[in-house]
Amino acid sequence: MYGLNAVALVFFGCINVLAYKLCKCPVSTRKKVISVLCAALLSGNLIRYIVIYPLIIGTIMIPVEFSTVAYFAVPTILLISKKRLHGWAAYSGLMAGFFYYMAMIISGGPIYAEFPAADVFISMFCHGSIYFCGFVTISSELCSTKEAPSLAVGVILVAVNALVLRPFVAGNDGLLIYILLDGAIIHRFLPQSAWVVAMPAYYLTVAALVLITIRGFFRRNKRQFLKFCTA
């Protein structure tokens, strides 16, 4: 069961080492590698969600989770945008990839042991790819803290997208984004009489945590940019 945790740890370590090495390469090499990876990630997921899921498996899958939205947003932005939204692409890639791999390393066996091996490794590749792209982007470009509101708006838009599409998402109650939006932990562990106070406190806490990650993103961006681009 815990072999998957070890595999995730090894994968995550390799991703960080490869990203670190790429950051030391010339800018032209970084751009080529990121462009190829983004093209592979985007085309692969377009095939998965447009062809494989509906036509072969017979299930319509709608990207609503933060990470699955990032599968499409990160490569699209990095391929066609001229730095305007690169901060959001890097932030979403780092957040989705980092927290996914932390969950895999800590409890990947119990959570994903029943999933088909192919699905697990595809998920690891996708999350690793967007994390890798985020790591290299913040090492190559200095993002302005003035972009902080746009990062927060991006998170809100992902939540709104999930809420709007919820009626069309099969088995939506089991998805992490709906568990978070519903405040399932409050409903599970506190009596209903406490919800009127606990739910606002819960949403304020979630908002505060998002703002903390955004602040941390800019700090890490500054450190890595100074390390790799001004040495």
Image: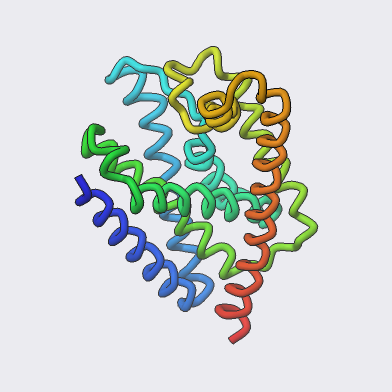
- Specify whether 17 is left or right of 192: left
Q: Quadrant of the C terminus?
A: bottom right
* Closer to the camera in the image, 204 or 190: 190
Where is residue 178 drawn, in percent x and y?
Answer: 54, 27
- Specify whether 48 is left or right of 200: left
Residue 62, above or below 137: above
Colouring used for the render: rainbow
Whether residue 40 can be seen here: no
* Closer to the camera in the image, 225 or 188: 188
Residue 10, above or below 99: below
Residue farthest top in this picture: 167
Where is residue 135 drawn, in percent x and y?
Answer: 51, 63
Q: Residue at x 51, y 25 (%)?
A: 188
* Closer to the camera in the image, 78 or 171: 171
Quarter of the image for residue 223 reads bottom right
Q: Residue at x 48, y 32 (%)?
A: 176
Where is residue 138 drawn, in percent x and y?
Answer: 59, 65
Q: Quadrant of the N terminus?
A: top left
- Specify whether 122 is left or right of 191: left
Quarter of the image for residue 203 reads top right
